[in-house]
Amino acid sequence: GAGVSQTPSNKVTEKGKYVELRCDPISGHTALYWYRQSLGQGPEFLIYFQGTGAADDSGLPNDRFFAVRPEGSVSTLKIQRTERGDSAVYLCASSLRAREDEQYFGPGTRLTVT
Amino acid sequence: AQSVAQPEDQVNVAEGNPLTVKCTYSVSGNPYLFWYVQYPNRGLQFLLKYITGDNLVKGSYGFEAEFNKSQTSFHLKKPSALVSDSALYFCAVRSFMEYGNKLVFGAGTILRVKS
């Protein structure tokens, strides 16, 4: 079946602009996660949704970052007033249930802020 | 303190030889442990997990890992390496007591298998 998909695959934006990154999880997966991966590092947690609600947003670095999942399926990560330090690969993952199940990752969106 | 440590930045092994990629963790309670592999320009692929039960878990592509509670380790192993196994490997831990449902990843280990 279809895996996790993310769009766009690449995004180049100017400092100060607003960007939206989209994630389509595996159908039926109730849990959705966003991570950020910088070059040479492991993924770092940003936010986790169970259904429509953000169950844990402790990884969001500041209030410029926000994510939604209004219908419990597709999620959008929104970044306001982008900074060069936001450049990274943003990964989305989903799992059938939150607790025991492994997370399946999408291919990521590479964000470059110039 | 680092929750997950992968002490080797890179592991080199000859094709056909056994391979080990090391992972140690330092979290409270009974963590869940995972291994993922990342090929260039691709997302992370799940290999295997330890939740409970048998300490030796088997996963995709002939990989296995052994959970050792006394040594707080979860090393990834394969009896006979293939050139196609060359990739970046990540160990991850989920500790509900400390972190809730999120995965905490190690820094990754590059595996190079030479023919």
Image (tube, grey):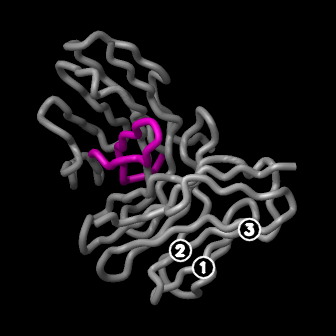
- Chain letter of the residue carrying label 2: B
Residue located beneath label 2 in the image: B74
Vertical order, A110 against B22 (above or below): above
Residue found 33% across the figure and 71% down from its top: B95
- Chain letter of the residue carrying label 1: B
Q: Amino acid at mark 3?
A: Lys
Left or right of A60: which side holds B44? right
Asked whether residue A34 is drawn in magenta, I would say yes
Query: In terms of sequence position, does the residue under pointer 1 or pointer 3 come before the other?
Result: 1
Q: Amino acid at mark 1?
A: Glu
Task: Locate the N terminus of chain A by quadrant.
Answer: top right
Q: Amino acid at mark 2?
A: Phe
Residue located beneath label 1 in the image: B66
Instruction: Report whether mark 1 lies on the same chain as mark 2.
Output: yes
Mark seen at residue A88: none
Task: Locate the C terminus of chain A by quadrant.
Answer: top left
Where does the magenta region start and end? A27-46
Q: Are marks 1 and 2 in contact (CB under 8 Å)?
A: yes
Counting from the top left corner in percent of width and height, residue A31 is at: 36, 53
Left or right of B97: which side holds B71? right
Mark seen at residue B78: 3
Nearer-the-camera pick, A100 or B88: B88
Within-10-Å neighbours for mark 3: few <14, some 14–19, many 20+: some
Within-10-Å neighbours for mark 2: few <14, some 14–19, many 20+: many
- Measured in 3D between alpha carbons, the distance from the residue under mark 1 to the one under mark 2, in whole angstroms, is 5 Å
- Chain letter of the residue carrying label 3: B
Left or right of A53: which side holds B91? right
Q: Secondary structure at mark 3?
A: strand
Counting from the top left corner in percent of width and height, residue A36 is at: 36, 40
Residue found 82% across the figure and 55% down from its top: B82
